[in-house]
Image: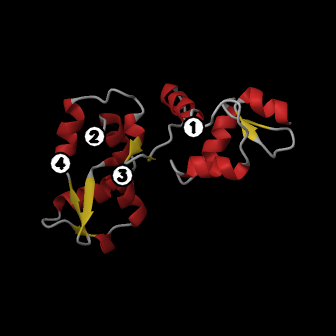
C-alpha cells in the first residue's frame, strides 16, 4: 500500500503529472508505446498506474487506500515487492533505511566489494550509491587498503 507522501512524490514531477493525466483521461488506458518508459515506471512503482496488455491504466483506489491506514513501518513506503523503489535524500527515513540495510552485514565478518555489491543489488540496482551512503554514515567501513568492508570495528581491524 502506498503512503500519501509516495503518491505526492511520484506526481511532483511535471512530466510525470502530465503523463498521469493523459493515462487518466484515456478511455481504455494509454498505449504503452505512447508513454516514456522511465516516467511510466515511476507511476507504476508508486501504484498509481498498472500496465497490462500494452496499455497503462490509472488506479484511482490507490488514493483511498493510502489514506485508509498509514503503514506501521516508515520504511514500508520505500519498498515494493522487496525492492527499494525510493532512496530518501536526507532525514530520519534515510537514517532508518541505512540502518536497516546495515543489518544485512553480520557483525564480526569481513566482506569483499563483490560481496557488498551482491547484498545491496538484491535491494536496489544502484548498489554503489547505497554502499557509499552506508560508508559515509559510518554504518559500513572500508579497510585502509580498500579490500574489505564490514561494520566499523571489523573493517578497521582488517585494514
Mark 2 and mark 3: Cα distance apart in space: 11 Å
Which of the labelled discs sits on residue 1, or is there none? 2
Which of the labelled discs sits on residue 136, or is there none? none
Look at the numbered discs 4 and 2 and tell me whether their residues touch, using CB distance below 8 Å.
no
Q: Position of residue 31 (x, y in %)?
A: 25, 72
In front of the other: 4 or 159:
159
| Residue that badge 4 annotates | 60
| Residue that badge 3 annotates | 45
- From this view, report whether residue 147 is shown above or below residue 24: above
Q: Secondary structure at mark 1?
A: loop
Lower position in the chain sequence, tag 2 or tag 1: 2
| Residue that badge 1 annotates | 104
Mark 3 and mark 4: Cα distance apart in space: 15 Å
Look at the numbered discs 2 and 1 and tell me whether their residues touch, using CB distance below 8 Å.
no
In front of the other: 15 or 77:
77
Q: Residue furthest bottom?
A: 33
Mark 4 and mark 1: Cα distance apart in space: 36 Å
Judge from the rendering whether residue 47 lies leftward or rightward of residue 119; answer left or right: left
Q: Position of residue 87 (x, y in %)?
A: 50, 41
Q: Nearer the viewer, mark 1 or mark 3?
A: 1
- Quadrant for residue 22, please give it: bottom left
- Quadrant for residue 63, please give it: top left
Mark 1 and mark 3: Cα distance apart in space: 24 Å
Lower position in the chain sequence, tag 3 or tag 4: 3
Q: Position of residue 97 (x, y in %)?
A: 51, 33
Judge from the rendering whether residue 72 lies leftward or rightward of residue 108; answer left or right: left
Q: Secondary structure at mark 4?
A: loop
Q: Nearer the viewer, mark 4 or mark 2?
A: 2
Q: Label 4: how many residues lie within 10 Å, few (<14), some (14-19) or many (20+)?
A: few
Amino acid at each position: 500500500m502506498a503512503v500519501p507522501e509516495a503518491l505526492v512524490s511520484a506526481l511532483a514531477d511535471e512530466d510525470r503529472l502530465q503523463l498521469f493525466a493523459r493515462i487518466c483521461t484515456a478511455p481504455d488506458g494509454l498505449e504503452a508505446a505512447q508513454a516514456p518508459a522511465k516516467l511510466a515506471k515511476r507511476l507504476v512503482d508508486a501504484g498509481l498506474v498498472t500496465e497490462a496488455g500494452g496499455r497503462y491504466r490509472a488506479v484511482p483506489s490507490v488514493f483511498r487506500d493510502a489514506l485508509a491506514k498509514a503503514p506501521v513501518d516508515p520504511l514500508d513506503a520505500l519498498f515494493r515487492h522487496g525492492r527499494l523503489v525510493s532512496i530518501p535524500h536526507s532525514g530520519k527515513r534515510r537514517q532508518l533505511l541505512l540502518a536497516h540495510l546495515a543489518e544485512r552485514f553480520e557483525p564480526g565478518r569481513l566482506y569483499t566489494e563483490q560481496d557488498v555489491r551482491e547484498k545491496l543489488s538484491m535491494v536496489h540496482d544502484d548498489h554503489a550509491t547505497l554502499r557509499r551512503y552506508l560508508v559515509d554514515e559510518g554504518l559500513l567501513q572500508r579497510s585502509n587498503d580498500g579490500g574489505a568492508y564490514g561494520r566499523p570495528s571489523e573493517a578497521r581491524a582488517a585494514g
